[in-house]
Amino acid sequence: MQRKTGLKELIEMLRPKGNYTKTDIENYSELSSGKIRAALLTKNQQELFPIFSLIEDKDSSIGAECEKRISSITNKFFTHSLGEAENENIEELIKASVEARVFGMSLVELYIKEDGSLGVSKVDREFIHIEENKPFLINNGKSFEAKEPFFMSIYAKPALIKTLWIAFAKHFVLSQYLKFTEFLGVPPLIGNSSSGDEKVISLMAEAFKNIRSGSCAVLGPNDVIKVLEGRGSQADFMEFVRYCDGEIAKVINGSILSSNISSTGSFAMSKVHDYNRKEILAGDVKFASRQVQNFYAKFGKDANLNIQIEKDSDLLARAQVLQILGSLGYQMDPKDMAKEFDLPEPANNSNFKLFKNSKEKALFLDNIDKSLFNANTKDEEAAIEQVIKDILKKADSFEDVYENLLNKYPNADLEAIENTLERVIANAEIKGML
């Protein structure tokens, strides 16, 4: 059985971060149908890597959508249990994980920092080239394979693989569009000559060829020039380009409302777009969290990584549900509350009110305080609740309930009664929603 390498042993093996040469020429490949067919058939990085690098730089729509997909995770706040010293390493692992989801492969370098600790850095794609389906780097003019223990590769099914044919079709049509505009820039001319002399007709044809903007030609009084207008239009080409950009946006980020290719939208479309984006985001977060967890598990550490992707509206809805449940008697202790909302545990639990169903042990000032906390007041609470129910039957609104209570019990402490009344209101709200 192979023994796992410990963190201390790994650091002793590592070296400082390397300086590598860009391999821009190696990254680029011809965007042809043959190359794309080979990439789709083999589905290996030997064929995919150079094509992905090409279309990311060549196609502004693909480049923008890739950047949007990656930045939607890398700019999120995250928490973990490894200490602040590991923040930078975890950020690099998250970036590499999301990049692998987009491009199919990413490379991470493990090196030793100046303080002697472990460093993690994502290697940019412009420094990588692929040989025999393995990542290689160039250092001091020499090419070498990037492999363990100094490097770690992350692989996933690339999202960009579904954009290859649509990207090829888009750029093929754009190339034809340039020929089309060149053809229509000087429309064909048809000339009718009043003379049947071959020499005159030849001179007239030469004059037609020279007719451009700002030029002139001398023709006979009975000669006629007609312009042959094409039926094609620029709109046909641009509509197809917009369609391609829309499909690219759907593949990479789930929808098109946040891109520049959607001119209209609706509330329903925005809901679908938001749902698709959340699903893709959640998938990226799950993949990145697993990669970080597996990396630190090699050294016997538990990262407990939590990337916070929920919006304030989601947290507000959960808080409102807990508030309603709290009024019904269901309470959460500080630890459960921190776990539910991805918050750090409070340093001093004494700031929180303790409930009988709390997991934490209650500390009381004296035996009297303990007796009051554990006292069985169900009979008194039932009596108070029955009084409120009787008043509710005779009242037309909650305002009438308060007035009747004040009139009937002018000197009573209404805190317990108000709590019961709030519970009744919450029950009415829940029943109304159901």
Image: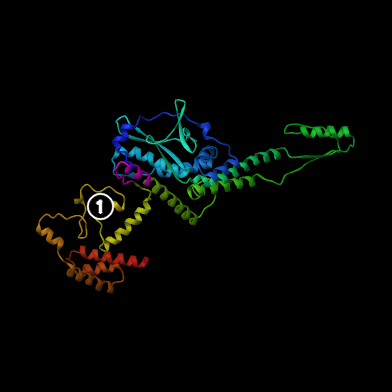
Residue at left offset 46%, top offset 36%: 135
Residue 127 in percent (x, y) is at 46, 32
Residue 223 in percent (x, y) is at 85, 38
Q: Which residue is mark 1?
A: 335
* Left-right relation of 7 to 37: left
Residue at left offset 25%, top offset 72%: 389
Q: Quadrant of the C terminus?
A: bottom left
Tell me, yes or no, whether the highlighted magenta stretch contains residue 285.
no
List the single residue furthest toward the top.
Answer: 140
Q: Is residue 250 above or below residue 213?
A: below
Residue 112 in percent (x, y) is at 33, 32
Q: Quadrant of the N terminus?
A: top left
Residue 327 occupies quadrant: bottom left
Please name whichever residue, 63 or 102, is drawn nearer the observer in this view of the structure.
102
Please name whichever residue, 399 or 64, is drawn nearer the observer in this view of the structure.
64
Q: How many other residues sit within 10 Å of disc 1, few (<14), some (14-19) or many (≥20)?
A: some
Residue 256 can be seen, yes or no: no
Please name whichever residue, 299 or 1, is drawn nearer the observer in this view of the structure.
1
Q: Is residue 421 above or below residue 360?
A: below
Magenta highlight range: 290-305
Q: How is the image coloured?
A: rainbow
Residue 267 can be seen, yes or no: yes
* Left-right relation of 166 to 276: right
Residue 188 in percent (x, y) is at 76, 40
Residue at left offset 83%, top offset 34%: 204
Q: Is residue 108 above or below residue 398?
A: above
Residue 113 occupies quadrant: top left
Q: Amino acid at mark 1?
A: Lys
List the single residue furthest toward the left.
Answer: 367
The local secondary structure at tag 1 comes to: helix
